[in-house]
Amino acid sequence: MIPELGHFALILALMLALVQSVLPMIGARAGRADWMDSARTTAALQVALLALAFAALIRSFVISDFTVVNVVENSHSLKPMLFKVAGSWGSHEGSLLLWTLILAVFGAGVALLGGNIPAGLKARTLSVQAWISVGFLTFMLFTSNPFDRVFPAPLDGQDLNPLLQDVGLALHPPLLYFGYVGFSIVFSFAVAALIEGRVDPAWARWVRPWTLAAWISLTAGIALGSWWAYYELGWGGWWFWDPVENVSFMPWLLGTALLHSAIVTEKRDAFKSWTILLAILTFSLSLLGTFIVRSGLLTSVHAFAVDPERGLYILGLLGVTVVGSLTLYAWRAPQLEPGGLFRPVSREAGLLINNLLLATATGTVLVGTLYPLFVEALTGEKLTVGPPFFNAVFIPVMLPLVVVMGVGPLLSWKRADLPGVAQRLRLALLVTAAVAGIVWYLQTGGPLLAVLSIAIAAWLFAASLREWALRIRLGDVPLREAARRARGLPRAAHGMTLAHLGVAALILGFVGSSAWKEEQVLFARAGTVVEIAGFEVVFEGVEQVRGPNYVAQQAQLRVLKGGEEIARLRPERRSYPVAGTTTTESAIRSTLVGDLYTTVGEPAAGPQTGQWTLRILYEPLVNWIWIGSAMLILGGLLSMSDRRLRVGAPRRAARPVPAAQPAE
Amino acid sequence: MSRLLLALPALLAVAVGGFLLWGLDPARDPNAVPSARIAAPVPEFALPPVAGTGMPGLSAADLRDTGEPVLVNVFASWCVPCRAEHAVLTRLVREEGVKLMGLNYQDDPADAARWLDDLGNPYERIGSDIEGRVGIDWAISGVPETFVIDGDGVVTFRYVGPIIEPDAQAEVRAALAAAGARS
């Protein structure tokens, strides 16, 4: 009964979405306030119905209702409760339901919280949002119903892939989807603005908090995913340039560009048509990602069920959304009057460089991801594009971006005084040179690119702190006065500084863990001692342990430094009898300086019985990747909590000329 | 002119969409690879050793008339799945006496040598294919990839991707056994 209720709720939500796709749009055109207002109710009811459906699915998983196909395929009665719940979004159907729920959450968010948005823009935005909902709800109901029943019901389920039974991964998809899908509302705002034929600073101000919310969440989702890959996959790597990673990374890169270009639109009434294009493309890349993950188009380690029929449906959806909105863009963008002239050296120019580099970086990732498909279609040859390509093209684009990041915030709008800025950054330059020298001295013979990258990170760190200090006039005025100024600074300013410092921390982590990593792989027997990065690791043997739905062989390791025991590590090999698979559980001693990362491989057989494959890595500075990510997220949250985004929203200036209504 | 520029994103999207549509053909399996090389003798090639390893290089002559089945593994130090696969290969060599040859694909010899120093070297001979020229003759699609060659130098089996999962290992063992039975 409950699954049928869920199914029914989905159908009702589709009906509401259909109404919302049409009524507010017509209302906005005809100027009927009641029709426009209907979106408030439909958006709120949609979210309630989809939440109900999602709750029904979770319940089916929690009580292990094996009459539901989705539960049979992705759960098992012995699975821990957390993973039963997480199983509800671990499958294609369940994650799609989560997708549409979040779509509705953003729609309802704008409907209920967007009180300062003019009725016409709001109504059109919500209609566009409902178009996307209709697309995904029909997709779910026609090809991927999560509530399909099976008869007779099997005795037990097939279990969720054990690799996915992890806290990090249980939380990763909801965060990622929140970001992915969050860009839908920005897309809807953009399309609504194109339909209205009007983009102005007020528009950018209204869009900003939603863009930030999506961006923060996507950042968190990607960071969590990379953290999961790091400690769960047992290779000690945190990024593989896998197609599935790339498709979440592309909207992030372009979303970052959007975040910055929207600032120019907000402050200077410039970059309008570019901001709109970014808003459309960012969500298009989210959709492309959904398509790639769910169609089995590319080879990847973590793609969902391969099903060409579903693929065709999403491709149709993708085609209508992307081509439709881009055509509308080509038609309407010329009418967005340009504004805000600026000189080659100015804040605008800095942000322009930022946007160009981020767009280029996105383009290289897109080409690298789809290149195998292009080549296969044109020549029939199969090939893979690996990390060497991405590292070779991506890093050279990003490093200059980081250099500009240090200078950008010091430039004034319209026309900046370059010698003055250079003077103010003298200290930062000095710090950079000193850091480069020290790193060079400590790591002679190491990769030159690593030293350069660290120097650039130091530059960004010093320049960002310097900019912040200048703003509060630290050093020029008494400390109390500076503290008062710091409190008076808008939170968005603190947010930017924190996020930029976060990028410096990220680079530190990226470089440390890839350029100066140490690694030992060996066959060990009880008593074997491994020396790595100044540690001694003693292998004491292997013990059998039992988990709720697995048995594990646990290696006992003692870590010594200077003869003293500093840690005990217990990496495991788990076998899951139901799923018939094994996983490697790493054990890590984590510090800010570096991680000692251990895994145990298969036991040897034959003459080597009693020996085990041990893998021990030393990853310097790796934790700065996640510290940096946390700083990005916190910086974003600080910006989002800025009062200016909530109160005192700008009044929309009256249209200077009653612009001619284009023929429609 | 500017209108054309603004229409460019839409046109590009249509073009990419065309490729995506082509890719959805149900008859196309992204993991499947044309098996042109199967049942054919190994291609003619001679590769120099990987500098800094002290190992001999690899040529077609080393794979002909060996009288026993041989595994040829294509690997590179930049390839993450290769790392995962390395332990399995090592085990096959040490415990089951498999003869393993390496084809080091588009790799910097110094990186490859360090990689082998770190992980251990299960290979009997390793050819260095820096340009990827020989890789084309073998029609490889990426790394890692593994071939079984029978005692007469005929390619009897090919596995694309890392040999890690138990199923994959079983396939390779079966192919080795079959190749051994034939020669």
Image (cartoon, grey):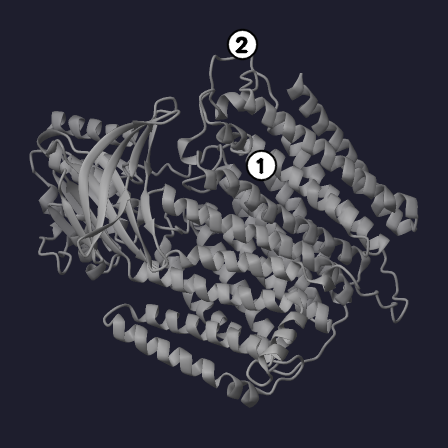
Q: Viewer-nearest of labels 2 and 1?
A: 2
Q: Is residue A204 visible?
A: no
The structure residue drawn at horizontal position 77% and vertical position 40%, both measured from the top left corner, is A43
Q: Amino acid at mark 2?
A: Pro
Q: Is residue A64 left or right of residue B171?
A: right
Chain label for disc 2? A
Question: Residue A514 appears at what percent x and percent y?
Answer: 33, 59
Seen from the viewer's position, the closer of residues A318 and A302 is A302
Q: Quadrant of the C terminus of chain B?
A: top left
Mark 2 element type: loop
Question: Residue A293 appears at what percent x and percent y?
Answer: 51, 41
Question: Residue A128 appears at what percent x and percent y?
Answer: 75, 47
Q: Is residue A281 left or right of residue A395?
A: right
**Vertical relation: A593 (above or below) B42:** below
Q: Amino acid at mark 1?
A: Leu
Q: Is residue A310 left or right of residue B143?
A: right
Q: Which mark is residue A152?
A: 2
Q: CA distance from mark 2 to mark 1?
A: 31 Å
Q: Residues within 10 Å of mark 1 (few under 14, many from 20)?
A: some
Q: Residues within 10 Å of mark 2 (few under 14, many from 20)?
A: few
The image quadrant of residue B147 is top left
Mark 1 element type: helix
The structure residue drawn at horizontal position 61% and vertical position 51%, both measured from the top left corner, is A284
Closer to the chain start, of discs 2 and 1, is 2
The structure residue drawn at horizontal position 51% and vertical position 64%, both measured from the top left corner, is A360
Q: Quadrant of the N terminus of chain B?
A: bottom right
Q: Is residue A542 left or right of residue A229?
A: left
Q: Is residue A27 visible?
A: yes
Return the residue at label 1.
A312
**Vertical relation: A432 (above or below) A16:** below
The image quadrant of residue A653 is bottom right
**Vertical relation: A37 (above or below) A645:** above
